[in-house]
Amino acid sequence: MNETTQIIRKLDKLIFSFTVLFLLTLTNSIFLNQIGYYGALLFILIRFAFTKKNPFPKTGLEIPFLFFIIAEIISTVFSVNHSQAFRNLLKRFLLIPVVYTMIVAAGDYKKAVLFVKIFLGAALITILAYIAFAYEHFIQQLYRIESKGPSPFQYVMTAGGLISFVAVYYFAFFLEYKNKLKFKVLFLTGFLITILALLASYTRAAWLGTIAGIGIMLLLKRKYVLLSAIAAILLLAIVLIPNESKIRFYSNGKDNPELVKVLDTQGRAYEVTLKNNIAYVADYENGILIVDGSFDTAKVQTPFPVTSVTFWGEKLFAKLVDGRFVLWNAVNDKEFQFDTEFVSPGDTKSFAIKNNLLYVNDLDSGLTVYLNNQNINERKRFPAIHDARNISVSKSHLALYNLNEKNIEIYSLDSLHLPSGLNGKIHLEKNYVNLWIWNNRLFADNEDGLYVFNLKDISRAPEIIKEIRGVISIKKRDNDAVILSAVGKIHFVAGDDEGNLREVGSYNLKFKPSSFAINGKRLAVTSYKRNRLLSVVDLYHTTNIQRIIQWETGLKILRDHPLFGVGDIDMQKLFSMYKPYYMKENFGHLHNNYVHILVILGVFGFVVFIILLAKIFKTDFTIYKKSISGTFQAAFALGTIGMFTAFLVSGLAEWNFGDHEIITMVWFSLGLNIALHKTSESIGKSS
């Protein structure tokens, strides 16, 4: 054996080792994954230098790939930010060789099969770990707080997409691969585990992609009965979990409130406030619903869905889902005339009305205090008080939770009820703290329970009420506090001058509430349930509203840069210039592959992009049609069609083409699909 042969064998081992690292980390570590990819590619190139033989076979995709890179280059030339566009062009260019790296690394059929098994096995282990994190997420009631799943390995939308792809592959092997029964059971078990994780991710785009991927595989296999059964299950999931919105009125009893009246609303009852025995309900798209003591109703129309309602002095005050605040003047208790609308300087996370002032907490621009509800231009800015997620105000104190530092910051208020100085900080290791100030006590709720601090001495160790978790709100009733938890339990709590608390009564609502208000002899509790599947087509769903505004804003940008786009850049700066004035958040992408490509590459680049996608789909489809039915290679080919379909459909609501982990998976699956096909043909079988 000569020296060159020994070097080539060592290089082959290194290529294999780095490829295995790449496969093991596809679903859990972008850092290690890219080490695996670039390591394998580097040693393939070194091997090429020794053998002088081009290891990269033609795939038929070279021309579409070339034109896509040309479109990226042209858009970079015409870009509004050349340096950023060039960096992203480089990223796209450097990831495309994943396709060819997989083809070369899988040099023979057995190795290609082994790569599939390593990928599926490692992915399943990652997904089992994800389910464990999701369980903790559920126990800590973070689904209610965040409305999304956990992000232990990557951002949750990315996690949902990756889990979706794995689910499709497991289903493909269950559907196509004709092997022993125990393997069928194994693939079905893997599929069910991934579906559980997919549901736990709470990502609707990934759900839609999975349904589309499974659907096209069933169509290709002509499994019409199974397809109909899955459609029936989805229909049942929609029918059996109907949308619901209710306001329940109770007598204000300390130990056992009695249900007096239940009203169904036409919207979704987000929040309720009580004034003069009249309930004012933020009923989202239905506006503000007003219910008097006789349960007669009236409405105040809002210019956009409303999420919060209260009073600022004698004026009705509401916060809309798009970030706007609206004021109405009272004609009487049930009639109101529009006064004004306004927005705060930054990204509003919470607000409080106290001392006849409006305190608005913006994550980025800090605290703004509005001094006069007759003139919203009278305000004081406190930019140093920032990075806060939650805020609570009393006559003498202002408290907020700084999520970055995990500190509760407590400020004293001066004679004008404005922040005058930092009293102190309380560090809590756990996140997601909601705050309420009542009777010189600061309530801080997180996953451990309800912390109660004495504001007269914040250095004093807090009382921790572990039985009360997931607090939605705390209200004052006479000298007591009334606490509503997310599990649907109302706690009546009294305290003495020393800061000691005791529960004097409780009541189990037996449903999950969204808010409550208590006043005199009246207790009002709102609740709403929305079918997560139906929310996909709900134009008023919060994230759907955001996406529609993003797409509309993107099309405005396109009108000014129609042919070659603005370049492959982060969209935040441009988005801020074109978005509606009331849209607080700036987005770096447009949550849609097709709209985003139109904007960054223009009409020319968009046409090239669609041709590339069509060519990839045709390549996968051709490979499947040439495969021998029931073989391992056919199963992977079928799964690749399903996975690519899932990617295309999810891309209707996500910029997953620009997601590093997602597009790496797309190029990997394409390359390995081609490798399995070529190596199975070379040995004259696929088994």
Image (cartoon, grey):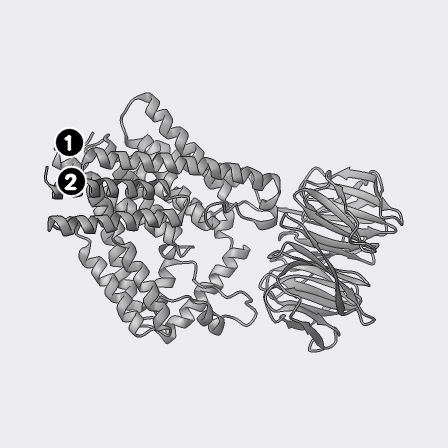
Residue drawn at x 65%, y 67% as measured from the top left: 325
Split into 4 quadrants, where in the image is the C terminus? top left
Mark 2: amino acid? Gln
Residue drawn at x 15%, y 50% as measured from the top left: 48
Q: Is residue 610 left or right of residue 436?
A: left
Q: Quadrant of residue 574?
A: bottom left
Instruction: Compare residues 139 and 277 and report the one nearer the observer.
Output: 139
Q: Which residue is mark 1?
A: 685
Q: Which residue is mark 2?
A: 6
Instruction: Compare residues 314 and 128 and report the one nearer the observer.
Output: 128
Quick one: label 2, few (<14), some, or many (20+) residues within 10 Å? few
Judge whether residue 301 can be spotted in this image: no
Across and down, in percent, residue 335 comes to: 75, 66
Quick one: label 1, few (<14), some, or many (20+) residues within 10 Å? some
Q: Is residue 136 left or right of residue 210?
A: right
Q: Can you say whether 559 is above or below 110 in the image?
A: below
Q: Is residue 377 left or right of residue 581?
A: right
Q: CA distance from mark 1 to mark 2?
A: 31 Å
Mark 1: amino acid? Lys
Instruction: Compare residues 452 and 600 and report the one nearer the observer.
Output: 452
Q: Quadrant of residue 602?
A: bottom left
Of badges 1 and 2, the one in the foreground is 2
Split into 4 quadrants, where in the image is the N terminus? top left
